[in-house]
Amino acid sequence: MTHIPRAARKGVVHDLHGVQRPDDYHWLKTQGKADPEVLAYLEAENAHLDAVMAPLRATQAAIYQELLSHVQERDDQPEVVRGAYAYFQRTLEGQAHAVFMRRPLSGGPEETLLDLNALKVREGMENVWVYRAVPSPDGRLWAYLLDTTGQEVFELRVLDTTSGELAEPPLTGLSGWVLDWNAAGTQVYYATDDATQRPDSVWRHTLDEAQAQAERLLHEPDPTFRVAAALTEDGGTLRLISQSNMAQEWWALDTAQDGAQPALLRPRERGTEVPILTDGGDHWLALTNHGGASEFKLVRFPKREGAALDWEDAQDVLPYDPARHLTGLHLFQNHLLLAGREGGFTRLWVLARTPGGYGPARRVNFPEDSVTVRIGANHVFDAGSARIVFTSLTRPIEHLDLDLTSLNTTLVKATPVPNYDADLYVSEQTWITAPDGERVPVSLLRRRDTLLPAPTLLYGYGSYGFSMEPSFSLTRLPLVDRGWVYATAHVRGGSELGRRWYDAGRLAHKMNTFTDFVAAGEALKANGTARELVAMGRSAGGLLMGAALNLRPDLWTAVFPGVPFVDVLNTMLDDSIPLTTNEYDEWGNPNDAEQYAVMAAYSPYDNLKATRYPHLFISTGLNDPRVAYWEPAKFAARVRDLAQPGSGVTVLKTIMGAGHGGSSSRYEYLNELAEEYAFALAAVDGTLPTPDAP
């Protein structure tokens, strides 16, 4: 039996509105993650988890082996052509991390650029992540951004491929979202963060010069905006953007001109969004909601030397259609590939480039409608085909080449999934009715021989406009093969049904996200699908878990809030921590009394009450920069304080050497998931051990 130290210390927190809120666990934040007492507390929580899981380790091991049986351990990812080489990643049996490879298109042996397994051992790292890797235009140099803590603070390393050594000492303290080369391959562009880990500056670094000599190209002082940068498809222009959820400002820089400075393309305009803008030669192309096009339209602007883009000059390339939600584009020399949504599912369209502009949009059709398709990695501007990615709930990911003229597809690689037979499974979509009458889609996956009602895992997210697509994941198979249903609630706050779906689940409408999810759970029980319900979500989906728990604690057998954003008020009132200020458009600004009241009504930590709670498996990473460890730690402690007789077991897992995404090892990831599934199975079977946790 493992005892967790009593952590409650009577106290309150004060907010800007003079409201006092009891917070007996605020010290877990204020003392910080390096504090010995905090570390001891988190280790004690991990020891309690070990005590709960001890009788279930055999089940966990069996599930892990099942997961591993579906993994093609020795595999190559599809090649991506850049310049004179084809680049790809290789995984090897027994090796936890990828090896970055390339081969010359002209022939010759493969080259190993970076073996993360060897690097991890050589430099004594616990975890390793590479967020972005980009070769120089001539292929002689290969730059990559490396994170070794999960804190999303990166080193920029540049490999000299001729010598196999680093071309210069690593640059440190970088953001992970920007990395590109100038046309000559002598300079790299990167970004850095401010003290709150908000990307606020884009830099130009000349190789062999000290990091202190780098030139800042763009700085954003507004704490509600963040910067990014990326090359245009032809590589000639670096697009710099300063963006918030509701506005973007665009700049352009000639990558071939020494000392070139960014030129303003489109100033920020609150409420007018231009999330994508690219160089079409004699014009600029933009996706925008300008003029009331809430689901976005595609327009072009003529280039005028030294002048910013003016809406009076904008010409429609694809007129606005409220039934079509446009989300992305990729420009080729002779074609334009567009991504979007219709009828709740992802779609692609191709437009030919003509001397006078663009031809009509032709939709790319597939045999099934309930699929997920997206634009893949494309780096050859004059290509006649585009790499796209295709999947469904029962069909593993396929990488296809789409002929941009005929719209025919050629299979490049089907992801191998050993010991998987798609014919054994069936996917469905059902619709449930939310309390306000809105119809919400729910995707379902089960074996054909599963008898209903059955134990059901209901997954949800519902924030930032991110859609939970009907895509294949081998990680669902151990549950589904045990007669479970795997369901995904496409709640408001995502973009499954377009921008209106997102807008209906944020700011003052955020409660819709939570009531949609609860309604989905209630409907699955009422219609005979679910016998027991287990809820799962991560990050903002963890917020969803906390809110759904408060709304209907009796509905769930177990709830799995992963890296959960559950202490909404305390986090959003603290503008010194990552993500706060540039997410006011998502959650609201608590300095405004009305917006504060909205958040106070659903903040999971603040709305916990004395009741019977289901089983809870809460997880976090000590180095998480997005949702700090203290949010889930405080939540677990307060649940235990308020849990009434008959409540389930509450455990907190802290991965001490990782951040928001968990462990970087593919094997550790599978083992962590197997642990959660073993907990869920025992919760449903009524066999979950209950050691004391005072």
Image: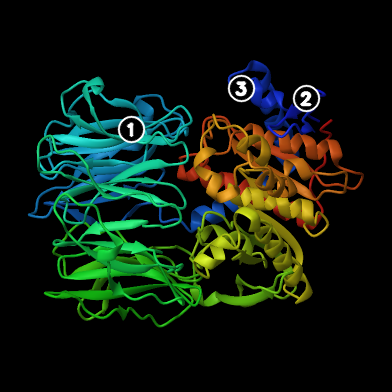
Check the image and name the residue furthest to the top.
Answer: 36
Helix, strand or loop under label 1: helix
Residue at image coords 49%, 42%: 582
Foreground mark, 1 or 2?
Answer: 2
Foreground mark, 2 or 3?
Answer: 3
**Alpha-carbon distance for marks 2 and 3?**
14 Å
Q: Of callouts 2 and 3, which one flags the residue occurring earlier in the amino acid sequence? A: 2
Judging depth in this view, the residue of 242 and 377 nearest the camera is 242
Q: Which residue is mark 1?
A: 118
**In the image, is 390 to the left or to the right of 550?**
left
User: If the image is split into quadrants, where does the N terminus sit?
Assistant: top right
Q: Which residue is mark 3?
A: 32
Name the amino acid, label 2: Ala
Is there any visible trace of residue 609 in the rendered image? Answer: yes
**In the image, is 47 to the left or to the right of 690?**
left
Helix, strand or loop under label 2: loop
Image coordinates of residue 125 in percent, x first then y, are 42, 27
Q: Which residue is mark 2?
A: 7
Residue at image coords 46%, 41%: 665
